[in-house]
Amino acid sequence: MTPLALLGVISSAIFSGTSLLYTTLGEIVGERSGIVNLGLEGVLLVSAASGFAASAVSGNPYVGVLVAMLAGGLMNLVLGYLVVTRKANQLASGLALMFFGFGLSAWIGRAYVGAKIVGLPRLSLPGLSNLPILYGSLLSFDPLIYLVLPTAVLVWWVLFRTRWGLSLRAVGEAPDTAFAAGRNPGRIRYRALLVGGLLAGVGAAHLSIAYAMNWTEYMTAGRGFIAIALVIFSKWHPLRAIVGALLFSGAVAFQLLLQSSGIQVSPFLLNTVPYLLTLLVLIGWGGRRKYAAPASLGRVYQGTE
Amino acid sequence: MAEPTDRRAPAGPRRILNGGLRYAAMAALAFVLFGVILRLAGKDPLQAYRDIFTSTLGSAYGISEVFVTMTPLLLTALAVALPSRLGLINVGGEGQLYMGALLATWAALRFSHLPSWLLLPMMIVLGMIGGGLWAVPAGYLRAKGIVNETITTLLLNVVAPSIVAFFVFGFWHSPMDTNKTPNFVPAARLPTLFGTRVDLSLVIGVGLLALFWFVMTRTRWGLEMRSIGGNPWASRRNGIPVQRYIVGVMVVAGGLAGLAGMAQVSGYYGVLLANFSRGLGYMGFLVSWLAGGSPLGILVTSFVVAVILTGGNLLQLTRDVPYSVINILLAMTLFVVLARPRFQRRRKTA
């Protein structure tokens, strides 16, 4: 194992973990307000497709990122209309949103299969410019990667250190009480979903515009569900989500590491490790998990009359 | 994640009329929106709708294809409806389906020399065992109050396709393709009916729906299960073994989804493909939820869903629109039902 190979492994793990962390953060914001979005997979697909299409049309990857965010936000607002305004069942609405995303993304992306885009630029870390070019290229990342950890801290700060975050969490725990305290649960949930959708959009943009740099149907390959699992693993906490994303990236890195050292371990089996680990962690917590999840998660707020 | 009961006053006639109008308008809206999307793609929406309906309901062949699409949905919906009677939310149909397909495929490849009358029952049993075992953790952890079954089943859904991929890519793939097994021998294929692609699993599915209705309404098991769904605490006080029911029902539900997986590989494909299901389990959840978990409702809803999906297949052939685009029409129809006015809402969830 040369240092170069090790660096390559770390670099690719960072790339695969970034989109996941953005998505997980978005889902945390939504779930903290009491709404579980099982349609995340569809949201990601639509964002990835529209972001990619916008990049291809405009030739500017940043436009692509913005469009992807917007698409993510709009998709989540569709869910908001169903579960907040129409008071529909959250799990069923989420799954319907997922199938909507399957279809919409295939339609948006159909003209851009195989299209070439300019990906997000890679920026080297300062002070590394004197390294050999190969090292330098492995250690240069796009802006979204640099921003992902600050974003996680920002989400934590907003959720736990601002009045808005307090209201949001209050609605997720006890919407009746929040309503009695003068909050508007519906409006807060819409906002939480919008923010969550924007974040998921960034994650999807990173996938299609910076990482894969192409569009294929179902390209997210279950990342939406992985993010939902990571939300549970991180106990609905943005900073623990970093650990969760690292765990996932670590599994990817470990996989590549083993491959490059000639040890034959199936990547498919290694892929299952994070989820089995999550399940074990949940079992380890025992019934205490219920103190971690927002108390009214998945419930329909009927209104207080 | 139970929904509290509707606290609003009963609907008056005026409200029903308003609601009904809105419902019809929204249903029309779903079709108009999808029409706009087709129009934007340069297709004629009216022609597309006509094609969808004539191709599916206009010929015997079309109807038989609808039955083909509908078959796995019957079983995966049943895998959701049964536990929902106990207040359990099984979102794990997808994973259970994969594990059922996995074990059935093992039998098909390992015992390919056996005659059909021996091999097929063996595959059916193994398919059900595969799905059933995959539901054990969810049932056990829920019964012991450790982890919610929704969370367990969602996590295991992500794991199952990886395990299938592990076996397909690692051991079972055919010499030509890396992502699928060799074609099954004829003895390992479910018999088809009347020269169509409809196979025996449709009959099994409808039979199981009838059995579900019978067990739920005419037996002590059904009574006790409904009792647990109503009030688990009181049921336990009355001596119903609630924990045993929870585990047992989850295993049976997993077995049903596993059977759907077995039918997909043995009947529909005749081969095990890695990632063969794009959400059949989740679609089953939606079907069961829309049908309110009733057997007849599941039959009707899965038929309607299958008409749309099968019509989408045709759109691809004649209008060169990607097949998945039909998911838009399907989802919009679902949205309309989800957003339907409250007077029609059932109290039961999933």
Image: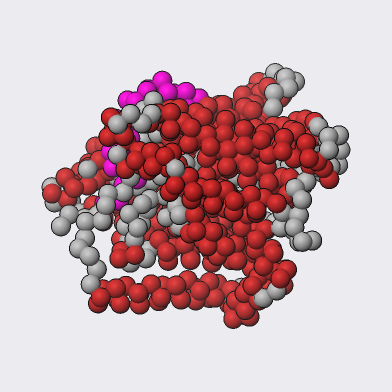
Which residue is more in the foreground, A157 or B248? B248
- For the question of whether residue B112 can be seen, the reply is yes
Instruction: Characterize the magenta stretch by its predominant secondary structure.
Output: helix
- Residue B180: give x, y in percent of width and height: 77, 41
Residue at image point 59% right, 66% down = B308
Instruction: Name the quadrant containing residue B294.
Output: bottom left
Report whether A127 appears left or right of A76: right
Where is residue B44 shown, x and y percent of the image?
A: 62, 80
On the rendered structure, is A101 left or right of B166? left
Q: Is residue A118 in the magenta section?
A: no
Q: Position of residue B271 (x, y in %)?
A: 77, 44
Given residues B335 and B149, the one toward you in this image is B149
**Vertical side of B79 occupied by B65: above or below:** below
Q: Residue at x 69, y 27 (%)?
A: A266
Q: Residue at x 56, y 56 (%)?
A: A102
Residue at 65% over, 20% down: A3
Tag count in the figure? 0
Which stretch is magenta?
A: A277-301
Q: In the depicted view, which residue is nearer to us: A160 or B95?
A: B95
- Is residue A299 magenta-colored? yes
User: Vertically, is B14 above or below A179?
Assistant: below
Question: Hey, which quadrant is residue B20 in on the image?
Answer: bottom left
Where is residue A159 drawn, in percent x and y? 29, 40
Q: Quadrant of the N terminus of chain B?
A: top left
Instruction: Using the image, determine if residue A202 lies above or below residue A7.
Output: below
> Which colour style is shown?
secondary structure
- Tell me, yes or no, if residue B156 can be seen here: no
